[in-house]
Image: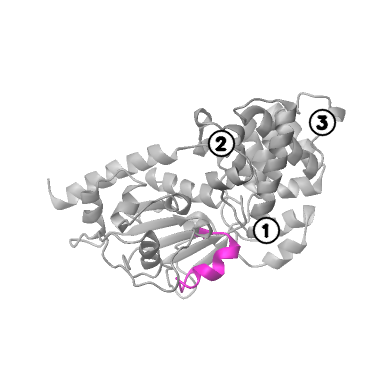
């Protein structure tokens, strides 16, 4: 087999494995057996430009929708298009609020590339790194080791791809959730240009972001806005794009896909459109999912009995669903009330310390066990 044929075969096998990995996702607080197809749930929307952000924050309700509809979106396929000067960015930062769809967008990019529907001529290989998963890695690791954790390529094939002297392989690496990284190293560390050298995971990431390793590769980095100052200490000359969530059309498409039943979907849309605040909040994908989840048990009732007319009622009903149906210890009312108080204390800690991820030791400090709350703790903040 020739050199080019070998790479072609590796590329084909990798696309197939990536497609298998990213074509389904475990929806927020669902159980493992409730995986859903990404293509059937994810609306066709793109991130929005940063222009007008302050005006959006001050606006609400119908005004927010009007602003989003007037703005021309920067779509996913156009992220690496040349700018007015003809320059093509090497680093794209997708910035957005919690639950706005950054991770889902990252996984959709992986799936569309693997399906040859996106960046077909731009990138030969696209790799995905989850910062949440990187936090759990013990000990030293190499860049090859880091990438091999999220793909099914062998270390040998990865080294061949990353260091191929025979041609210029076009690589894209997605670093998802920069804001979730728990930094433990103090000060600026020496870079690690060797893709096979094992060292602290933070040094590997810093070297990747600072272009000290794989300088010709392209990067997509997703992060919450609160971590932009930290991120800017590692990168420069990036194209920054804000993900602003669902447009009006996205919301309607999502609700119809969620229910798969036009009658139910239309009824839910009529109800949530009656409240400008609730309808505007549904621009955030995770909130839209919460509303749809709660409405699933409400839509069979008479209209006068439906309790989902305010944001407070929606979140209370959602919490009730979590504690009733997801708690392994059962739906006992006293037990639910006790668990709820402990979860509130945990959430309060998260707000005060700006902590967005909790470990087992955090639960234990508040007298909680995984058996009581798993997977409800994913929504405790």
User: Could you classify mark 1 by the number of other residues whose Cα lies within 10 Å: few (under 14), some (14-19), or many (20 or more)?
Assistant: few
User: In x, y percent, where is residue 246?
Assistant: 64, 49
Residue annotated with mark 1: 352
Give the CA distance from mark 1 to mark 3.
34 Å
Q: Are marks 2 and 3 in contact (CB under 8 Å)?
A: no
* Left-right relation of 65 to 157: right
Q: Is residue 302 visible?
A: yes
Q: Are marks 1 and 3 in contact (CB under 8 Å)?
A: no
Q: Nearer the viewer, mark 1 or mark 3?
A: 1
> For the point 50% across and 39% down, which residue is it?
38
Task: Check if residue 81 falls in the magenta segment.
Answer: no
* Left-right relation of 42 to 265: left
As drawn, 8 above or below 51: above
As drawn, 86 above or below 97: below
Specify the segment rendered in magenta.
222-238
> For the point 31% across and 49% down, which residue is it?
148
Residue annotated with mark 2: 370
Give the CA distance from mark 1 to mark 2.
23 Å
Q: Nearer the viewer, mark 2 or mark 3?
A: 2
**Dot 2 or dot 3, earlier in sequence:** 3
């Amino acid at each position: 087999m020739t050199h080019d044929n070998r790479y072609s075969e590796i590329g084909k096998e990798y696309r197939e494995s990536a497609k298998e990995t990213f074509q389904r996702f475990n929806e927020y607080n669902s159980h493992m057996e409730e995986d859903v197809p990404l293509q059937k749930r994810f609306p066709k929307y793109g991130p929005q430009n940063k222009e007008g952000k302050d005006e959006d924050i001050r606006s609400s309700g119908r005004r927010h929708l009007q602003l989003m509809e007037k703005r021309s979106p920067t779509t996913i396929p156009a992220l690496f298009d040349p700018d007015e000067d003809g320059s093509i960015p090497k680093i794209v930062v997708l910035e957005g609020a919690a639950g706005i769809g950054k991770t889902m967008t990252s996984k959709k990019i992986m799936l569309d590339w693997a399906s040859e529907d996106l960046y077909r001529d731009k990138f030969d290989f696209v790799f995905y790194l989850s910062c949440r998963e990187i936090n759990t890695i013990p000990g030293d690791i190499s860049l090859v080791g880091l990438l091999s954790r999220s793909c099914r390529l062998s270390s040998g094939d990865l080294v061949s791809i990353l260091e191929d002297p025979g041609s210029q392989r076009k690589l894209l690496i997605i670093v998802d959730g920069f804001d979730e990284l728990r930094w433990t190293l103090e000060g600026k560390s020496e870079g690690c240009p060797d893709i096979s050298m094992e060292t602290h995971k933070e040094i590997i990431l810093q070297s990747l972001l600072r272009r000290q390793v794989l300088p010709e590769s392209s990067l997509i980095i997703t992060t919450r806005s609160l971590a932009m100052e930290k991120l800017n200490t590692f990168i420069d000359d990036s194209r920054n794009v804000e993900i602003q969530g669902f447009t009006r059309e996205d919301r309607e498409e999502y609700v119809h896909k969620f229910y798969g039943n036009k009658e139910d979907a239309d009824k839910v849309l009529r109800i949530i459109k009656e409240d400008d605040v609730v309808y505007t909040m549904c621009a955030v994908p995770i909130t839209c999912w919460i509303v749809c989840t709660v409405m699933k048990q409400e839509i069979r009732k008479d209209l006068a009995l439906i309790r989902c007319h305010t944001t407070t009622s929606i979140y209370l009903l959602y919490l009730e669903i979590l504690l009733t149906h997801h708690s392994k210890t059962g739906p006992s009312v006293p037990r639910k009330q006790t668990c709820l108080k402990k979860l509130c204390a945990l959430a309060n800690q998260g707000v005060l310390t700006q902590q967005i991820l909790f470990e087992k030791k955090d639960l234990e400090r508040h007298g909680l066990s995984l058996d009581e709350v798993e997977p409800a703790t994913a929504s405790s903040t």
